Image: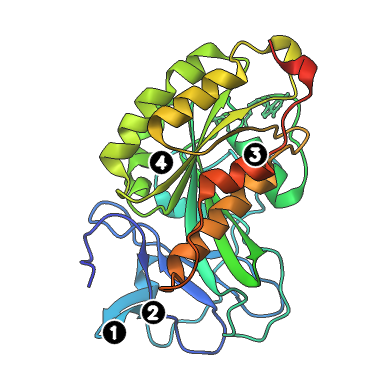
Amino acid sequence: MPSEHEAGPVLLRRPACHSAADLEVLAPSRDSPLWASVTGVAGRKEEPVGVRARAVERGRSGWSLRRGHSFAVPRPPPAPAHLSSGDMTGTPGAAATRDGEAPEHSPPCSPSYDLTGKVMLLGDSGVGKTCFLIQFKDGAFLSGTFIATVGIDFRNKVVTVDGVRVKLQIWDTAGQERFRSVTHAYYRDAQALLLLYDITNKSSFDNIRAWLTEIHEYAQRDVVIMLLGNKADVSSERVIRSEDGEMLAREYGVPFMETSAKTGMNVELAFLAIAKELKYRAGRQANEPSFQIRDYVESQKKRPGCCSFL
Ligand SMILES: Nc1nc2c(ncn2[C@@H]2O[C@H](COP(=O)(O)OP(=O)(O)OP(=O)(O)O)[C@@H](O)[C@H]2O)c(=O)[nH]1
C-alpha cells in the first residue's frame, strides 16, 4: 500500500461506477498537493480533469474518491495549441489538466482498453519529443517557432495490437537540464522509454550515454528502452550517420530506428512496438513464442532514402 507521502504516481482503485473510468494520483507527496487525474468524466467525451487532494482518500482497498465528492471540478483553461506551456512550478499534477484519449462512446465504467502502460519521451531539448508525440497522437507536425517544454506533460492514446487494446499514457518531458529533477520522479513508474536524439545535432547524440546513465539510475530495471534518431527528413543537415545510431543501440542492447516527427516516418511503429512488448509481458503464457522487440523493429522499420545518408 503506498504511503501518502510517497512520491510518484500511484494507481488508484476505480471509483464508484457512476462516471469515472480511471483514476490516478499523480503526485502524492508532503510538499506538493495531491492531484488526481480522472478520465471518463460525465457525458460521452473522455477528458482528464485535475482533482485536488481533498477529493481523494486512502481506504482499506486503496485510494479512492472521497465519498460525496462529485466530478464537477472546474474545467482547466483550454490547452494552448503547443503542448509545451505547462506548469512552471514543476507540480507534476499540473499535467493532469491536458486532454486525454480520443472520445469514446463506451458506457461509463467499461474501460475502453485492456492494458495500460506508461511511456516517457526523453532526450535533449529540441530533438523533437513534443513533435513526435503530436505526430503520433494527432497526425500533425508542429512547425515554426520552437517552444521548449516546461516540466512534464502527457497524452493518452489507445492502440490495438493483436486484438488487444493498449492504452499508452505518453509523458513528454522537458529536455532542458533545469527540469531534470522534476522529470526524474517519473522514471520509476514508466514501463517504456523512448530516447531521442537529433541526427542533425551532434551533442544530442553525444549526450545519449548520459541519458542512459540517468535511466539506469532512476528507472525500473526491466524498463523497455528504444533509441530513436529523429529528424531523418533533414538529410542535408545530417551529422550523425545511421550506422552510428545502430552501433550505439547495439552496445546497449536496445532497438533503434531513425524517425521523422515531420513526415511521420516510423513514429507509429515506435509506439506499436512498445505496445506489443507491453502486451507480451502482461500476458506471457508458458507456450507463447517470445516477442523480440529488436527483431520486430528491424523487420518493420522504414529507412530514409539512399541520398539522406552521408
Ligand atoms: N525537420 C524536422 N524538424 C523537427 C522534427 N521534430 C521536431 N522538429 C523541430 O524541432 C524543433 C524542436 O521540436 P520539439 O518537439 O519542440 O523539441 P523537444 O524535444 O520537445 O524540446 P524540449 O521541449 O525543449 O525538450 C521544432 O522547431 C520542431 O518543429 C522532425 O522530425 N523533422
Label 3's element? Answer: helix
In the image: residue 6, left or right of residue 194: left
Q: Which residue is mark 4?
A: 89
Q: Say what amino acid the circle numbered 3 marks.
A: Phe
- Residue at 63% in and 28% down: 230
Callouts 4 and 2 close, C-beta under 8 Å: no
Q: Which residue is mark 1?
A: 61
Q: CA distance from mark 3 to mark 2?
A: 32 Å
Q: CA distance from mark 2 to mark 1?
A: 7 Å
- Residue at 30% in and 60% down: 28
Q: CA distance from mark 3 to mark 4?
A: 25 Å
Q: Which residue is mark 3?
A: 132
In the image: residue 179, left or right of residue 279: left
Q: Is mark 3 within 8 Å of ligand 1?
A: yes
Which badge, 3 or 1, comes first in the chain's sequence? Answer: 1
Q: CA distance from mark 1 to mark 4?
A: 32 Å
Which badge, 3 or 2, comes first in the chain's sequence? Answer: 2
Callouts 2 and 1 close, C-beta under 8 Å: yes
Q: Is residue 241 above or below residue 250?
A: above
- Residue at 69% in and 82% down: 106
Label 4's element? Answer: loop
Quadrant in which the C terminus is drawn = top right
Quarter of the render that holds ligand 1 = top right
Quadrant in which the N terminus is drawn = bottom left
Specify how the rendered protein is coloured. rainbow
Report the mark closest to the observer, 3 or 2.
3
Label 2's element? Answer: loop
Q: Which residue is mark 2?
A: 13
Whole-percent x, y for residue 77 in the image: 63, 54
Whole-percent x, y for residue 26 in the image: 39, 59
Which badge, 4 or 2, comes first in the chain's sequence? Answer: 2
Q: Note whether residue 80 is visible.
A: no
